[in-house]
Image (cartoon, rainbow, N blue to C red):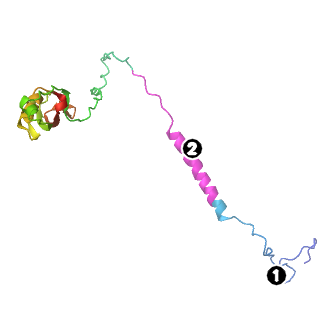
Amino acid sequence: MSDPMNRPNPDPTRGNVPPPVDPPPGEPRKGANPVVWIIVLIALLALAWYFLSSRDSVQVSPEEPATPIGQTETPTDDATPPRREPRTPARTPQPTVADREASVLDSVEPEYPVAAARARDQGTVLVRAQVDASGKPTEVDVARSSRSRDLDRAAVAAVKQWTFEPAIRDGKAVASTVQVPVEFTLDQR
């Protein structure tokens, strides 16, 4: 049988079929690059994520209460009133007061003892005072002496008359112990 169009015979036994042609070695192969497919897949996933997340974040306006605020709803015979949970009052934030130690509020100048002045005694007496929650000294004694009994006694007598600002702990006035220096100099007389 002969072909009226003179087409080549696809039968390989006949030998007139051209062999498959490979591309030249420097030319890239035409086909799907895996990197392109990965980029397309990532783009599709990002697009799907964008549409799904925007659908979930649609703002819904809150429902208006059936009865105005401040009025009570009167129940009808055929409907039971809605059950309302009791509201807890909002707590107002309390200002936090920083903890602090007791400090001198008002001090009385000690009298320089005459015997100490004649003996030319001078120095500093460190006085320890127990201060109650109202700021009054309750127990007063010498923490470090000036080496003059007269100066020590005068310092204790003066600090017993002082008033203090009480110490603060957790926002409340509490009793505490303070040490205050009392100086005696001959120039002071």
Mark 2 in CB contact with mark 1 (< 8 angstroms): no
Residue in the picture at 36% in, 18% down: 69
Q: Is residue 98 magenta?
A: no
Nearer to me, 174 or 29: 174
Quadrant of residue 111 within the rendered picture: top left
Q: Nearer the viewer, residue 68 or 99?
A: 99
Q: Position of residue 78 (x, y in %)?
A: 31, 19
* Quarter of the figure with the C terminus: top left
Residue drawn 14% across and 36% down? 122
Q: Nearer the viewer, mark 2 or mark 1?
A: 2
- Disc 1 marks which amino acid? Pro
Q: Which residues are magenta?
A: 38-65
91 or 172: nearer the viewer: 172
Horizontally, is 87 left or right of 178 in the view? Answer: right
Residue 57 seen in the figure: yes
Residue 168: name its quadrant.
Answer: top left
Q: Is residue 5 above or below residue 53?
A: below
Q: Secondary structure at mark 1?
A: loop
Q: Is residue 186 left or right of residue 28?
A: left
Which quarter shows the N terminus? Answer: bottom right
Q: Position of residue 124 (x, y in %)?
A: 15, 38
Quickly name the residue at label 2: 51
In the picture of the structure, the residue carrying the numbered disc 1 is: 12
User: Mark 2 falls on what kind of element?
Assistant: helix
Question: Residue 3, image x and y in percent?
Answer: 91, 74
Q: Quick check: 181 above or below 162?
A: below
